[in-house]
Image (cartoon, rainbow, N blue to C red):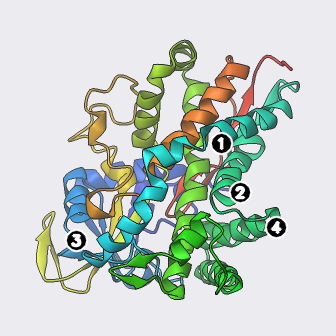
Amino acid sequence: MTVATQIEPEDLMANFDVHDERLKDHLYETLEAMRRRGPVHRSEAHGGYWVVVGHREVTQVARDWRHFSSAGGVVLAGTKPQKYVPVEYDPPQHQSFRRLLNPHFSKEAAAAFEPLLAAFADKLIDQFIADGAADLTEAYAKPLAAHFFFDLFFGLSPDEAAQCEQATNKAMFSSSVEDQVAGFSQLEKYVRQLAVRRRGLPSDGGFIDSVRTGEVDGRPVTEEELIGIIQLMIVGGDDTAVHTIGNVLLELGRHHDIRDRLAADRSLMPAVLEETIRHMPPAVSIMRTVMEDMELGGQQLKAGDRVILMWSSANRDEAVFESPAEFQLDRENIRQHIAFGGGVHKCIGEWFARTIVSVAVDRLLRRLPDLVVPDDARIDYRMGQSRGPATVPVTFTAGR
């Protein structure tokens, strides 16, 4: 049970750590307090690093790969054994892999999954629509995202998908460094076994085999690179999709006027999604390594220092967004959010995210147009380098 009272931002600012369980309930107030003091802060957690909270500075670091490299890793505690490809490469190697992967993550590729995803969403809704109440995380968001990534995209069996989910949850959301290490190791072991089983076989045409038999810079993709790619897509895809669906449904269940507007006009879905991921971005943070001594946000950084980019803070920076703690559907400068990152390392899966969420919300509002999050509902959050509701309790008029 997370602590919901008697926690001061000052307590969480000192040695700031996204895996601190107290941040589940106090993330945004802590980040607001940090921004008031400055855009860059020092934490001595995990051996020491800089926490970047200002929108301008986060954007600067995200776009400047020459001075802030991804090659030193993107997970702060050094808890995973495998280099993730291509996010932990800088140009030009990064672009070589993106050219190989981009066709699989295009807007058109994402749209091709819509009919199958919609059909599965309806099957899920059929299971609880007669009840008049449901937890939409467990009953809807989690199985829908898992179906998309593990079944439709990766072509894994239910048992294989369960292994991946279990390992990823331990790696991404455990407060214990030991558990994080164990989770990443379990995922690496499983993905390695998956790659070995496909070794030497003809391509089945799916994503994994298309990459396995592909080329970068005129040479074959190595098995280690394939393992790094698969792990990145698992870690970066499933949980963030679950969290984004949950966050959108929380917004709609709490703002009935916006829910009704969207139910009547589906063209508002892009605006709802963009403002949701600004207001409650599923990706919390990512790490970079400083390449040479330099100044950032009034702080002197040295070569080799680690910095954490806080997407969750940048997207609520008062210097950029008016009344940033409020959900505003018609926000004029919404495109300034950086929930998908920025620069050459911008999230490759953004069209997948938009497609999954749009289909999920569309099917749900067609069947449950009056869904409500009760005023007294207690929302618990999963928190780490990604954040989202562990539960989304709703009530609605029972149907069939």
Which element is circle 4 on?
helix
Question: Tag 3: residue type?
Answer: Trp
Q: Position of residue 227 (x, y in %)?
A: 56, 80
Q: Position of residue 386 (x, y in %)?
A: 52, 58
On screen, residue 332 versus residue 269, left or right, reads left
Cα–Cα gap, marks 3 and 2: 34 Å
10 Å crowding of disc 2: few (<14), some (14-19), many (20+): some
Q: Earlier in the sequence, mark 3 or mark 4?
A: 3
* Pointer 2 residue: 151
Mark 4 or 1: in front is 4
Cα–Cα gap, marks 3 and 4: 39 Å
Q: Residue at x 12, y 66 (%)?
A: 298
Residue 81 visible from this viewpoint: no
Cα–Cα gap, marks 2 and 1: 29 Å
Residue closest to the eye, 332 or 46: 332
Q: Earlier in the sequence, mark 2 or mark 4?
A: 2
Q: Position of residue 94 (x, y in %)?
A: 32, 73
Question: Tag 4: residue type?
Answer: Asp
Up the image or down, 280 lies above or below 334; here it is below
Cα–Cα gap, marks 4 and 1: 29 Å
Q: Residue at x 34, y 56 (%)?
A: 341
* Pointer 4 residue: 159
Q: Residue at x 69, y 34 (%)?
A: 377
Q: Earlier in the sequence, mark 2 or mark 1?
A: 2
Up the image or down, 102 lies above or below 301; here it is above
Which element is circle 1 on?
loop
* Pointer 3 residue: 65
* Pointer 1 residue: 379
